[in-house]
Amino acid sequence: MESLNASRTLLLLDTCHSGSAVSPLKDYRGMKALRLLARAVGTHVLAATDRTQDAVELGSLGHGVFTYALLEGLKGKADTLPADGRVSAREIIRYVETQVPHLSHEYADYAQYPTGYSRGADFSIATGKKR
């Protein structure tokens, strides 16, 4: 990612045990690694699970619960603070982190917990109708 030379980065990981990629970013050594990883104005990472979990895939939703929540959020459901017709990186992370445990429990009787990390400026990733 360092070679991308991007000013804004949103990395989405929809795999089992994907929280393993986020956990190091939350500790002291990870902070140094993140500074080296991204010289970006805004860097946001969202993993489908914590580091020990499997990602729930459900035919009834047409996607896994992570992808389902992500797509619903991008359609505008994540546009909350402020409700301005745009979905930001932080809004989608908050929305997915809230919805995935609920959806995984409702549809699969399993609690899946996404892992998110944000650093730097927030930025819009989707637009829609202003609420």
Image (cartoon, rainbow, N blue to C red):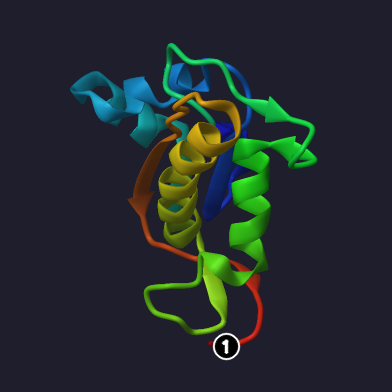
Q: Position of residue 76 (x, y in %)?
A: 60, 71
Q: Position of residue 87 (x, y in %)?
A: 54, 69
When asked about the image quadrant of residue 62, the answer is: top right
Task: Identify the residue at horizontal 74%, vertical 42% (top origin).
Answer: 61
Per the image, the residue denoted by label 1 is: 130
Task: Identify the residue at horizontal 49%, vertical 84% (top origin).
Answer: 84
Is 23 situated above or below 79? Answer: above
Residue 26 horizontal side relative to residue 125, left or right: left
When asked about the image quadrant of residue 128, the answer is: bottom right
Q: Nearer the viewer, residue 86 or 102?
A: 102
Q: Nearer the viewer, residue 35 or 22?
A: 22
Is 54 situated above or below 25? Answer: above
Task: Identify the residue at horizontal 41%, vertical 39% (top origin).
Answer: 116
The residue furthest left is 28
Residue 7 horizontal side relative to residue 119, left or right: right
Work out whether residue 81 can be spotted. yes
**Could you tell me which secondary element the residue under label 1 belongs to?**
loop
Is 84 situated above or below 3? Answer: below
Q: Position of residue 122 (x, y in %)?
A: 42, 63
Is 79 situated above or below 85? Answer: above
The residue furthest top is 52
Q: Position of residue 1 (x, y in %)?
A: 58, 33
Residue 67 horizontal side relative to residue 22, left or right: right
Amino acid identity at mark 1 = Lys
The total of numbered circles placed on residues is: 1
- How would you rate the neighbour count of disc 1 (Cα within 10 Å): few for under 14, some for 14-19, many for 20 or more? few
Q: Nearer the viewer, residue 101 or 33?
A: 101
